[in-house]
Amino acid sequence: LIGVDSARTSVLTVVALPGSDPRPRPAGPVRRLIGTGVVLSPHQILTTSSLALPGGTFSVRLGGGEARDVRVKGVDRQSNVALFEVDGPPLQPLRRASPQSVAIGSWVAVISNVNVTRPQITLGRVVGRGERVDFPYSGEIVEIEASAYPGSSGGAVLNEAGEWVAIVVGRAGP
């Protein structure tokens, strides 16, 4: 697949820390959520809504290990996406293509930050398109068959030209 390596700089690790909870909790480490985000524009990151914890604090980790604070700009829980805003030097967005640019049977690459420190790339195929009644989120679905791991949510789905066509929002199968 062409352009997959250059896309790595536009796929970031998103870290969400829950807000303060007035209920007593046992002592121990603070639980954090880690997922993947895609640079949508120089100061915006798209990821899944599960990372947009109400009252939480958020940051992204860039490829070189740099951390930046981010703010929630919008959440659509029905589609399972969230938009975050980041300050500082502009980030490099992915080249976009229409989801219609991938046909059933097409190869795709999924880039996600499942191990926090560097993006992981898995290959898969498009196995379905359109709406699914058994999938809990709304909108057009590009169903892919590819390996998924904790942290894959929010990952970028790239077509054979290395262009961004979809975001991983969940698992539809067992």
Image: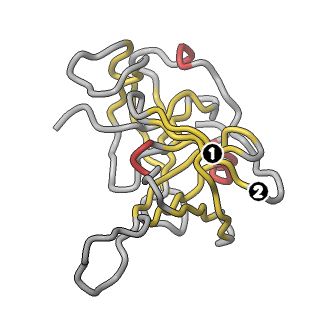
At a point 69% along the width and 48% down the height, the residue shown is 6
At a point 45% along the width and 22% down the height, the residue shown is 106
Q: Is residue 141 above or below residue 144?
A: above
Label 1 crowd (10 A; few <14 / some 14-19 / many >=20)? many
Viewer-nearest residue: 29 or 108: 29
Which residue of the protein is positioned furthest toward the bottom in this rendering? Answer: 27
Sooner in the amino-acid sequence: mark 2 or mark 1: 1
Quarter holding the C terminus? top left
Image x and y of residue 59, in percent: 59, 63
In space, the residues marked 2 and 1 are separated at their CA atoms by 11 Å
The amino acid pointed to by label 2 is Asp
The amino acid pointed to by label 1 is Ile
At a point 56% along the width and 29% down the height, the residue shown is 159
Viewer-nearest residue: 118 or 27: 27
SS at circle 1: strand
Image x and y of residue 34, in percent: 43, 61
Residue that mark 1 sits on: 45
Residue that mark 2 sits on: 87
SS at circle 2: loop
Describe residue 33's horizontal placement relative to residue 60 as left or right: left
Image x and y of residue 12, in percent: 59, 55
Label 2 crowd (10 A; few <14 / some 14-19 / many >=20)? few
Image x and y of residue 112, in percent: 48, 51
